[in-house]
Image: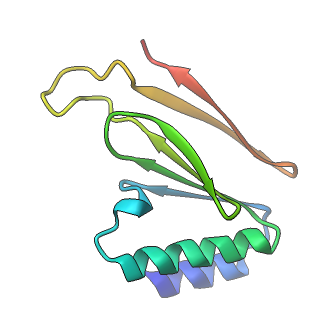
Amino acid sequence: QWSKMTTDLSSFTGNNVVILLDKTPSNFSNTTERDFFRDYLEELSANGKSVAVISCEGTSSWVGQINGVRYINLPALWNSDGTYNSNAKILSMKCDSNGITYDWIALS
């Protein structure tokens, strides 16, 4: 997977990189894998790419930026007990030559 990802991203000529994950990188079970992933994305950012990692884990939304890479977490639609998560949101994104912008849209 890493070879495919790095090969694809190394040949990518666009300005914006958006990666979708079902788990936030900080919760990767393998810390070496997490560090490699973050280091590689930070290198892309340092070389002028706008980089965003979108995950969906847990029941809250959050945004953080680490060394030029924006990390965004979408909250799950359902709580662990099967009830509707009132924090559920949709993320609206725009990627253009100016970078990546986003806005939260509440579901309730």
Q: Give the residue displayed 69% in from the left and 77% down from the top.
A: 43
Q: Residue at x 65, y 76 (%)?
A: 9
Closer to the camera in the image, 59 or 84: 59
Q: How many marks?
A: 0
- Where does the image place residue 26, in percent across and percent down from the top left? 41, 61
Q: Quadrant of the N terminus?
A: bottom left
Q: Position of residue 21 (x, y in %)?
A: 43, 57
Residue that extends furthest to the top in the rendered view of this protein: 108
In the rendered structure, the answer to whether residue 91 lies left or right of residue 13 reads: left
Q: Find the residue positioned furthest to the left.
A: 81
Q: How is the image coloured?
A: rainbow
| Residue 16: quarter of image | bottom right
- Residue shown at 50% from the left, 81% from the top: 36
Q: Quadrant of the C terminus?
A: top left
Residue under the image location 36 percent in, 56 percent down: 23
- The location of residue 13, given as percent across then percent down, is 79, 72
Q: Is residue 42 above or below residue 27?
A: below
On screen, residue 19 versus residue 80, left or right, reads right
Q: Residue furthest right?
A: 97
Residue 81 sits in quarter: top left
